[in-house]
Amino acid sequence: MIERELMILLADDDADDCLLFKEALDELSVPVRLTTVHNGEQLMLLLNKNEMQHDILFLDLNMPRKNGFDCLSEIRQNKKLDGLAVIPISTSFELEMVNLLYKNGAQHYIRKPNEFSQLKHLIQDGITIVAETHTAQALKEGFVLLGES
């Protein structure tokens, strides 16, 4: 059970996806505060300001100005951001991409499902796992969080 309010950051350029993510969070019984940015440049500016310490970043990979891969690399090179759990979220699922995300230090990877209920379940799983393990990276076999088929 999550006892404190978690600071969640969502980086996604798609307004509809941001709305669905917020709706999913609203339906979960988890105390969270959501901040949203819409491109990689905004994300890195916010993180480098360091005004607020976020617990989890849900990171879209295909964003304008700076993509999620570049952001993940920058985040992992910045020692001040060591405590930030990063969970990339994308519709694509290529093994090479997943391996690169794992190698670059993401905690988990979520493949965006088509069903809202599955999205809600995956967000809940990601939040719960990070709350329990802090910023420990998942074992390779548990790295990808998939919706029920």
Image (cartoon, rainbow, N blue to C red):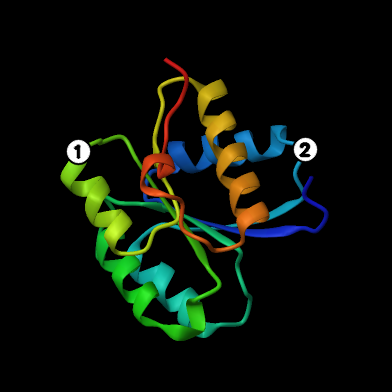
Nearest the viewer among 114 and 95 is: 95
Task: Indicate the position of residue 108 as horizontal and vertical percent values.
Answer: 43, 49
Three-letter code, disc 2 = Ser
Badge 2 crowding class, 10 Å Cα cut-off, few under 14, some 14 to 19, many 20 or more, is few
Badge 1 crowding class, 10 Å Cα cut-off, few under 14, some 14 to 19, many 20 or more, is few
* Screen quadrant of the N terminus: top right
User: To which quarter of the image does residue 3 belong?
Assistant: bottom right
- Indicate the secondary structure of the residue bearing disc 2: loop
Confirm whether residue 67 shows in the render. no
User: To which quarter of the image does residue 15 belong?
Assistant: top left
User: To which quarter of the image does residue 65 belong?
Assistant: bottom left
Residue 84 lies left or right of residue 45; in this view the side is right
Residue shown at 45% from the left, 84% from the top: 79
Residue 91 lies left or right of residue 38; in this view the side is left
Confirm whether residue 110 shows in the render. yes
Three-letter code, disc 1 = Glu
Nearest the viewer among 35 and 96 is: 96
Position of 10 relative to 75 (above/below): above
The residue at which mark 2 appears reads as 29
Residue shown at 44% from the left, 38% from the top: 17
Report the number of discs.
2
Q: CA distance from mark 1 to mark 2?
A: 32 Å
The nearer-to-camera label among 1 and 2 is 1
The residue at which mark 1 appears reads as 94
Task: Indicate the position of residue 8 as horizontal and vertical percent values.
Answer: 60, 57
Given the current orientation, which residue lies at the most extreme left position?
A: 96
Mark sitting earlier along the chain (1/2): 2
